[in-house]
């Protein structure tokens, strides 16, 4: 059996932009950059060079300031270097969702322990922008319809690695969870999908209660490990 890092890198290197998107929607694919492939490989070889089962954690899709730069889910250039020990050439600008997720990771024993138990991916593996701003795969009906088969194929491809656990976790209790749950009912990817509030929502609208939400994440993620 191939190690997980080999699967992850091959999958992302082969990503191509989906067809049929509206002209004003641009695809965000950090994997086309050589520097991204180099630093992401260092990360995945460090934390995923084994065949252990992991809980899949689904974000929405890469954004401009986190995984849209680093190609690593909820990992901005700052945390990639300071928390994961991966030097990188990117501008060291922090991103709110990454700040929250790495607080959770710290509570779960740090990156080495966390990534041994969990694999962060996204419902849609490529990100999008519209008029220069982040755009989610579900932000309009046409985009969602256009991307649905692309998303299904993406999830199926990752499940062929045979390294997932029966329960997955969805970050986002609204549209991301509703859509992923609907796909799961149709395709039976997982026995169960648990939802948590999206890190960006926590940091933007509920920051005074951040300790509560970190605790909630820790409880749910421990229950799936």
Image: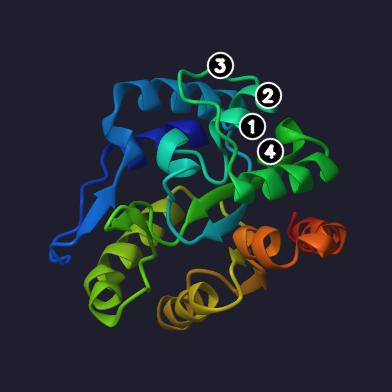
- Report, in whole angstroms, how far the alpha carbon at label 4 lies from the one at label 2: 19 Å
Q: Residue at x 48, y 69 (%)?
A: 189
Report which residue position mark 3 lands on: 87
Which quadrant of the view contains residue 130?
bottom left
Disc ID at residue 79:
1
Q: Nearer the viewer, residue 146 or 45?
A: 146
Image vertical order of residue 41 relative to residue 196, above or below: above
C-alpha distance separating marks 4 and 1: 17 Å
Q: Which residue is mark 4?
A: 116
In this picture, residue 211 sits left or right of residue 138? right
Tell which circle, 4 or 2, labels the residue nearer the N-terminal end.
Answer: 2
> What is the x, y in percent for residue 3?
50, 32
Callout 3 secondary element: loop
Q: Is residue 196 left or right of residue 69?
A: right
Q: Is residue 59 visible?
A: yes
User: Marks 1/2: CA distance?
Assistant: 5 Å
The numbered mark at residue 82 is: 2
């Amino acid at each position: 059996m191939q190690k997980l890092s080999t699967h992850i890198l091959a999958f992302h290197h082969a990503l191509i932009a989906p067809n049929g998107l509206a002209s004003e929607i641009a695809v965000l694919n950090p994997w086309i950059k050589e520097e991204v492939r180099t630093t992401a490989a260092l990360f995945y070889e460090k934390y995923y060079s084994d065949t252990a089962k992991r809980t899949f954690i689904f974000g929405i899709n890469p954004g401009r300031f986190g995984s849209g730069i680093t190609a690593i889910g909820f990992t901005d250039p700052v945390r990639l270097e300071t928390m994961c020990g991966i030097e990188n050439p990117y501008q060291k600008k922090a991103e709110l969702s990454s700040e929250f997720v790495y607080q959770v990771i710290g509570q779960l024993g740090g990156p080495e322990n966390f990534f041994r138990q969990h694999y962060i991916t996204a419902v849609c593996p490529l990100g999008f922008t519209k008029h220069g701003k982040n755009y989610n795969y579900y932000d309009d009906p046409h985009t969602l319809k256009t991307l649905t088969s692309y998303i299904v194929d993406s999830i199926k491809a990752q499940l062929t690695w045979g390294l997932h656990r029966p329960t997955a976790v969805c970050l986002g209790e609204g549209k991301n969870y509703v859509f992923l749950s609907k796909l799961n009912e149709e395709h039976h990817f997982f026995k169960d999908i648990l939802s948590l509030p999206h890190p960006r929502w926590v940091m933007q609208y509920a920051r005074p209660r951040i300790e509560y939400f970190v605790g909630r994440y820790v409880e749910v993620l421990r229950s799936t490990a």
